[in-house]
Image: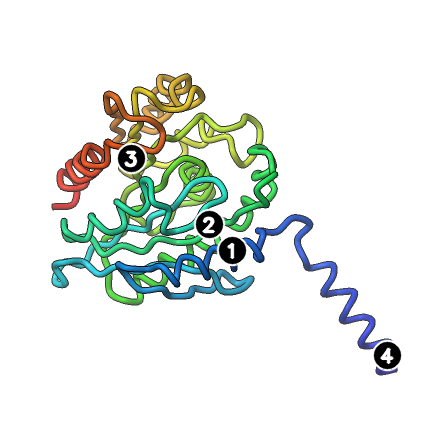
Amino acid sequence: MQKLTALLFATLAMLTIPAVASDLEKEGRWAEQVVDALLDGEAVYLNDGRGDFLAIETESADGELRKAAIVMHGTGVHPNWPTVVLPLRVELTQSGWHTLSIQMPVLPNEAEHAEYAKIYDWVPGRLDAAIDYLRDKGFDKIVLIAHSQGSTMTSYYLSEAPKPVDGFVAIGMSGGIAGGPMDSLAQLPTYKLPMFDLYGSEDLPEVLASADQRAAQAKQSGGDYTQQMVDGADHFFEGEENELLDAVNAWLDARFP
């Protein structure tokens, strides 16, 4: 009887394992590398209901302000990625924002971009955990700031149902892939919170090609939508970090003074 019970529990456990999961071994390797080299901020671990994942919390220079930004990286990397993510999570603290940069779900290096659709169901748990963590600490204004595929993941999250956040900054966002969880063009009209769509004039072809479509789709929601192109910037804003920060800060200051 004990053997039968053990077999039953083992079978049920196998059935509850998702067919495709985030590459947790890769996440672990990233976490070791990031934590060992961390200079600004503190490593914390949040739980998304499936397990613990890494986040980097960096305190605002003005502890009296109760506003926070959740920062999200692009395809397959980590929450201290040197382009876009690191400058934002550190420098926004000088403008009064407490930041929490989180590890997004990843796949092995050889995975094709479209394969990421299979792990988008890991996104809501991670964002919910990050939001709950900040709300529990008393932050009453929370914005989501995401780069590249982090933007399409965030769009997917926001399109599911109204969320307890106050704004969305999408950097280098593409139109996604039609007909599934990565279909950001279809998702854009579904959420009405303030959105800033920022990209560079030398961005990826799929970002540039969908810019007009993104604007048209987002404006269908009737919400507060702003699109801006930074002249000379590529997808990673390399050499244009100040322009990136200036643009994001200007948008944030106008809405959350």
Out of 36 and 25, give the one closest to the viewer.
36
Tag 3 residue? 195
The residue beneath circle 2 is 104
| Lower position in the chain sequence, tag 1 or tag 2 | 1
Residue at 23% across / 21% down in the picture? 231
Mark nearer the N terminus (2 vs 3): 2
Q: Position of residue 125 (x, y in %)?
A: 48, 55
Residue shown at the point (24%, 51%) measured from the top left: 90
Count neighbours of disc 2 (C-alpha within 10 A) and say few if under 14, some if 14 to 19, many if 20 or more.
many
SS class, disc 4: helix
| Quarter that holds the N terminus | bottom right
The residue lying furthest to the bottom in this view is 2
Q: Viewed as shown, does residue 4 lie left or right of 9?
A: right
Where is mark 4, residue-wise? 3
Identify the mark nearer the N-term, 1 or 4.
Answer: 4
Q: Nearer the viewer, mark 2 or mark 3?
A: 2
Is the residue marked by circle 4 packed among few (<14), some (14-19), or many (20+) residues within 10 Å? few
Q: For the residue marked with disc 3, what is the amino acid?
A: Met
- Residues under numbered marks 2 and 3 in contact, where contact means CB atoms less than 8 Å apart: no
Q: Give me the disc on residue 27.
A: 1
**Quarter assignment of residue 149:** top left
Q: From the image, state whether disc 1 or disc 2 is nearer to you.
A: 1
